[in-house]
């Protein structure tokens, strides 16, 4: 008997060099066996060296894309990535309130790995107030966790502190939190293990996989969040979805050695 593929929607930015954003999300969905839909909220001009420009999709057209997809497609899970502006955040929140998809995985993208800001500063509060209450789980990295809590990064510089920060963020957001890329107690990435901390149902738990060393890690945040959305759509519980997504990202980083894309920080390879 063949199982039906669930539909998963990415609402995110476009990275024309293919490493991050909706391009990475769609490859992740395909690799994990779900059908991918994608609504771009912003177009970036970028390559492996950096972001040279951002074109915000006008919010009435963003709304039109969302209405057109949601009114026709049964969406099992949504991944939300780069939105760019406060208006885009409001448009996405309105659509999620209207159509109530089963799962919402929110990657609170604030900056590109190359440093360029990907969310206007005035939109951070709107993201917290409007989108966090609609999320099943949010997936900030350590730096985003510090920024969202308005706390300096050292507070999440070890797994225990990261767990406490995730719990505080979860209490503010009233949803589960997966803090990714936790640093060790010297404030550096653990050399042997990659550590994420999951807060859900009032508990925190460390998820660990052996670290895969690579300078080609562009798109890891996008890949992780879209893998969590895909695994939830496939019926896994949240802990299992997060653990499987962490392992998928580690394999995608390792498989990145087969890609030769540009001269800067290269992408991970979801097509394992
Ligand atoms: N979304 C878009 C459109 C981006 O361009 C980027 C980074 O460049 C991100 C998300 C975040 O990327 P990462 O998965 O490397 O954190």
Image: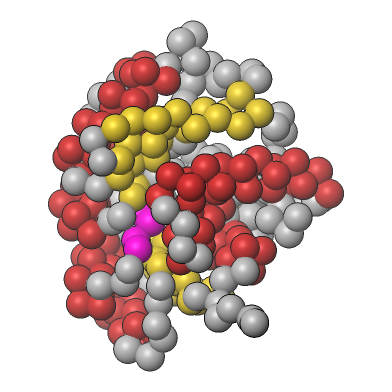
SS assignment for the magenta stretch, majority: strand
Image coordinates of residue 162 in percent, x first then y, are 36, 24
Front in this rendered view, residue 64 or 222 = 222
248 vs 256, left or right, is left
Up-down relation of residue 82 to residue 77 (above or below): above
Q: Residue at x 28, y 56 (%)?
A: 135
Q: Residue at x 77, y 47 (%)?
A: 255
Quadrant of the drawing holding the N terminus: bottom right
Front in this rendered view, residue 192 or 129 = 192
In the rendered image, the residue lying farthest to the top is 186
Up-down relation of residue 112 to residue 165 (above or below): below
Image coordinates of residue 49 in percent, x first then y, are 65, 45
What are the residue bounds of the magenta stretch? 103-108
Q: Residue at x 49, y 15 (%)?
A: 184
Front in this rendered view, residue 77 or 39 = 77
Quadrant of the drawing holding the C terminus: bottom right
155 in magenta? no
Image coordinates of residue 208 in percent, x first then y, are 55, 30
Residue 229 visible in the current orientation: no
């Amino acid at each position: 008997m063949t199982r039906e593929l669930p539909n998963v929607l990415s609402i995110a930015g476009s990275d024309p060099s293919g490493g991050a954003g909706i391009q990475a999300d769609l490859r992740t969905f395909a690799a994990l066996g779900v059908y991918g839909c994608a609504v771009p909220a912003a177009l970036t001009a970028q390559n492996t060296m950096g972001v040279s420009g951002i074109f915000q999709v006008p919010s009435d057209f963003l709304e039109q894309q969302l209405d057109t997809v949601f009114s026709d497609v049964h969406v099992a899970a949504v991944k939300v990535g780069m939105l760019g502006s406060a208006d885009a955040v409001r448009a996405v929140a309105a659509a999620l309130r209207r159509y109530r998809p089963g799962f919402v995985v929110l990657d609170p993208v604030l900056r590109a790995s190359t440093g360029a800001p990907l969310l206007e500063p005035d939109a951070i509060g709107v993201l917290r107030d409007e989108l966090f209450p609609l999320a099943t789980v949010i997936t900030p990295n350590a730096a985003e966790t510090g920024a969202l809590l308005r706390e300096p990064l050292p507070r999440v510089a070890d797994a225990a502190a990261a767990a406490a920060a995730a719990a505080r963020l979860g209490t503010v957001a009233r949803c589960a939190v997966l803090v990714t890329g936790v640093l060790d107690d010297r404030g550096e990435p653990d050399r042997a293990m990659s550590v994420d901390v999951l807060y859900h149902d009032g508990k925190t738990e460390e998820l660990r996989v052996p670290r895969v060393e690579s300078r080609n890690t562009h798109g890891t945040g996008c890949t992780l969040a879209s893998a969590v959305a895909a695994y939830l759509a496939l019926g896994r519980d949240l802990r299992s979805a997060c653990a499987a997504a962490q392992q998928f990202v580690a394999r995608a980083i390792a498989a990145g050695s087969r890609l030769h894309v540009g001269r800067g920080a290269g992408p991970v390879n979801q097509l394992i």
